[in-house]
Every structure is written in structure tokens, then in C-alpha cells.
Image (tube, rainbow, N blue to C red):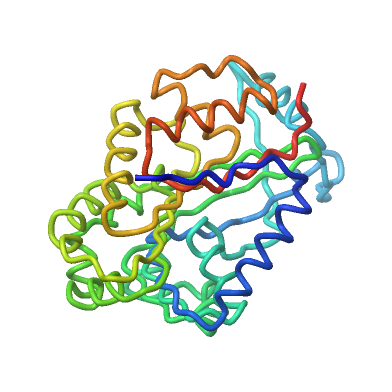
Amino acid sequence: MKTKSSFTPREPEEFREQCAAKLLTLVERRAGCMHLSGWMDSLTKSSTWWTSATMRRTTIGFPTIQRLGERVTGAAGKSTNIEMVVQRTKLGGNGPIMANALARLGIKVTYVGALGYPVMHPVFNEFARHAEVHSIAEPGRTDALEFEDGKVMLVKSVQLNEITWHSIQARFGRDKFIEKFSTADLVAFVNWTMIPYMSDLWASLLSEFCPNPRVVRRKIFFDLADPEKRTPKDISRALELITGFEKFFDVVLGLNEKEAYEVGNVLGLNTKVRSAEGLQVLARDIQRQVPSARWWFIPSPTPWR
């Protein structure tokens, strides 16, 4: 079976333009985006405290992660109070962001995920006006502390443990899910890392519903989403299941630079050569180990060192 790699290092602006052009060709098609994840992001930029002399509120900014770290480290053995000011709460998570973008391009999107249960959270209302949305669990929550030199994301994700094949059948419907899964031109599963039972869902779909492929092969997209926190055994199993879908779909596996090195380490590949050329070699080596996947490789904006 021939495979195709679309790994080509490009400038981020060029890559985004090409992605947008490609998506626009799909506007009249139907995409079933069963992403399953869902997040509420609270963006925070500063902390405040009351000054003891005047009892007036004074904004104390932490411009860098290092400055905040120094404040926290200095409290060791004592204590400190850092009040975080939420600037904005918005839709978040790989699934809702990707599905919302597709829907706003005019693609017919069906989304099944964690947006609030039994009542969807209002932060997702605008998204629901553009897509067919079904929520089966409470969303994860992220306090994103923004700094000049990056972000610190404090994540509360235990809610996503409710995303299981059993809960999908009970809260959305087995027949409805399979109908969407079986007829969509594009199926996407993202944020595998944060959903503990995603691999079990894939195994169920492969064993129960994939043995009757359509004549026209459809596309299925997988995004592991920074698998560093998962065990090598978990990652290996996920890659095996993804490969299994090639019998029935054209498989696309999305990896960014960091994720490519993590997957390469699990597969026992050479990840020590940190250069554009070394990354190309690594991408080809991963594809030989996971031979079913066509690749969308998203280069890092960080310059090579």
C-alpha cells in the first residue's frame, strides 16, 4: 500500500494560507467532527493585591513566567496571596476551536463533545449557532496565565473522564453517533491526550462498525495533542489503533514539532538531531513505523538553534 507524506517545512504564514485555501474547497461538503473534547479558557494577565497602608487595590503585574516563579518560590516555608484577574472567558479546546472554524467557513459540521451537561455552557452558544452541536459532558477548564515569554496553563480536566463509549450511547445515542460516523466526508478525533478513554472508543468503532467500508474512502483526522503526559504504552496503543483505520479511511495524523519528537522517542527513533533536516528524516521514519498515515506536519514558529 502506497503512502504519501505532505511534510514540507514552510513559513507559518504560508502554511496557514495553504490550509485556508484547502478548507475553502470543502465548503459544500459535509464534515462530521466528533471531536469529543471541550474546554472553557479563562485568560489572565495580571494579579492584584490590597496595599496594607491605604487599603487601595493596586495592580502588580508579572511580565514573565520567571518573575511569577520567583514570587512563588519566595513563599516556600511561608505563604503568599496572588489574586488572578480574569480578562476574558472564551471557547477553548482543540475540538471546539477546529469545529467552530470549519463551521464558520460554511462547512456543515456535527459536533459531539464536552460543552456542558445536562445544560450547555453559554460560552459555547455562538458556536452552536453555526454548527449542529451535541454535548455529553462538562467541559474541561483552563486558567491561562499569559506572560511576555509564554503561557502557564492550569488545567482542570477530570470532567473529561466522563467521555466514554457508554456515555456517548446514553447521552447522544448509539444509532445517531454511528449514522454520523458512517456518513460524514470528514471525521476528526482530537485531544486524545486529555481524554483517557478515547482509545477504547476507537477500538469499539474498529471492531463494531468499520468492517463495512463504503466504496468511496473518506478522510479521518487524528490529533494526539501533546502526548507527553501519557505513558509510552498508551501512545503505542493509540498509534496501532490509528493505523487500523487505514483499512476504511484515508488517515491523516497531525503532529507538530514537539509531538513528533515525543512519538519518535516512543517508537525508538533518532530524535537527537534537532534541525529542519533531522525533523524531515524523523517524519519519514515515523511514517514507516505508522505506515497508514498521510501527514500534516505543522512546523514550529521557533527558529532552529
Identify the residue at image location x=51%, y=68%: 99
The part of the image, by quadrant, that contains residue 279 is top right
Q: In this view, does 239 lie above or below 32?
A: above
Identify the residue at image location x=72%, y=26%: 71
Name the quarter where the C terminus is drawn. Answer: top right
Seen from the viewer's position, the closer of residues 152 and 197 is: 197
The part of the image, by quadrant, that contains residue 152 is top right
Q: Where is residue 23 in the image (x, y as percent from the top left)?
A: 60, 69
Residue projecting furthest to the front = 2
Left or right side of 188 for 261:
right
- Label tally: 0
Left or right side of 286 for 58:
right
Seen from the viewer's position, the closer of residues 183 and 74 is: 183
Q: Is residue 2 above or below residue 138?
A: above
Q: Position of residue 272 (x, y in %)?
A: 58, 14
Q: Position of residue 178 (x, y in %)?
A: 23, 71
Q: Is residue 302 above or below residue 90?
A: above
Seen from the viewer's position, the closer of residues 28 and 171 is: 28
Identify the residue at image location x=38%, y=38%: 291
Seen from the viewer's position, the closer of residues 31 and 142 is: 31
Q: In this view, does 174 lie above or below 6?
A: below
Residue projecting furthest to the right = 54
The part of the image, by quadrant, that contains residue 163 is bottom left
Name the quarter where the N terminus is drawn. Answer: top left
